[in-house]
Image (cartoon, grey):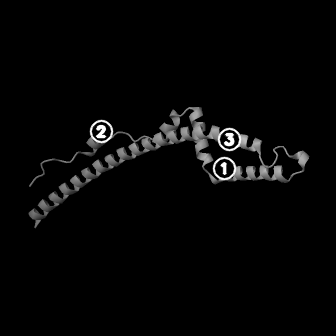
Amino acid sequence: MPSLVSPPSLAELKKRRAPVHNVNAEHKETLTRLEQFAVWITDHVGTMGFFIVIFIWTLSWLVWNSFAPKELRFDPFPAFVFWLFISNMIQIFLMPLIMIGQNLQGRHAEARAESDYEVNVKAERETEVILMHLEEQGRLLKEIAKKVG
């Protein structure tokens, strides 16, 4: 029994196929310098390296201002007012930058997910065409086998 729908040819498939694009490069090109800075901050603040730097800075500050000679201490124990002020300023500036960076990373993740979906749809279509061609070849082989045998 001949198939009612013939599978599309390779040329037809190529005409229908949209070109694959690099979502990562496209996203990076759309970012302004300030947005790139926010993403850089977001990427680096959430690392062990940043934690270690902050930890060592804090520990050094507290130890120095607790045990150094009194005339060399610049932020007296136990209040450490200057240290609290600097720490709060760092937090105030980092918090919005991190939130901006996370929003930009979220947009990038959505674009990647959409691109992945498009690639999956293309792969599914091409797989269906391959299966249709295989079915057609199987049918033709059966017809040839009947005629020969």
Type of amino acid under label 2: Lys
- The structure residue drawn at horizontal position 60% and vertical position 40%, both measured from the top left corner, is 95
**Which secondary structure, mark 2?**
helix
**Which secondary structure, mark 1?**
helix
Cα separation between marks 3 and 2: 59 Å
Cα separation between marks 3 and 1: 16 Å
Vertical comparison of 58 with 23: above or below: below
Q: Residue 91 or 19: which is nearer the viewer?
A: 91
> Is 88 left or right of 43, judged from the image as shown?
right
User: Residue 37: horizontal and vertical position, in percent?
Assistant: 60, 37
**Which of the two labelled residues, at mark 3 and mark 1, occupies the earlier sequence position?**
1
Label 3 Cα crowd, 10 Å radius (few <14 / some 14-19 / many 20+): few
User: Residue 140: horizontal and vertical position, in percent?
Assistant: 15, 57
Q: Residue 106 or 12: which is nearer the viewer?
A: 106
Q: Which residue is identified by label 3?
A: 88
Type of amino acid under label 3: Asn
Vertical comparison of 112 with 48: above or below: above
Disc on res. 101: none
Among the 4 quarters of the image, the one containing residue 110: top left
Number of marks in the rendered image: 3
Q: Which residue is identified by label 1?
A: 50
Q: Quadrant of the N terminus?
A: bottom left
Label 2 Cα crowd, 10 Å radius (few <14 / some 14-19 / many 20+): few
User: Residue 14: horizontal and vertical position, in percent?
Assistant: 31, 42
- The structure residue drawn at horizontal position 58% and vertical position 46%, both measured from the top left corner, is 43
Please report contact status of discs 3 and 1: CB closer than 8 Å, yes or no. no
Q: Which residue is identified by label 2?
A: 15
**Which residue is at the far bottom?**
149
**Which of the two labelled residues, at mark 1 and mark 2, occupies the earlier sequence position?**
2
Type of amino acid under label 1: Phe
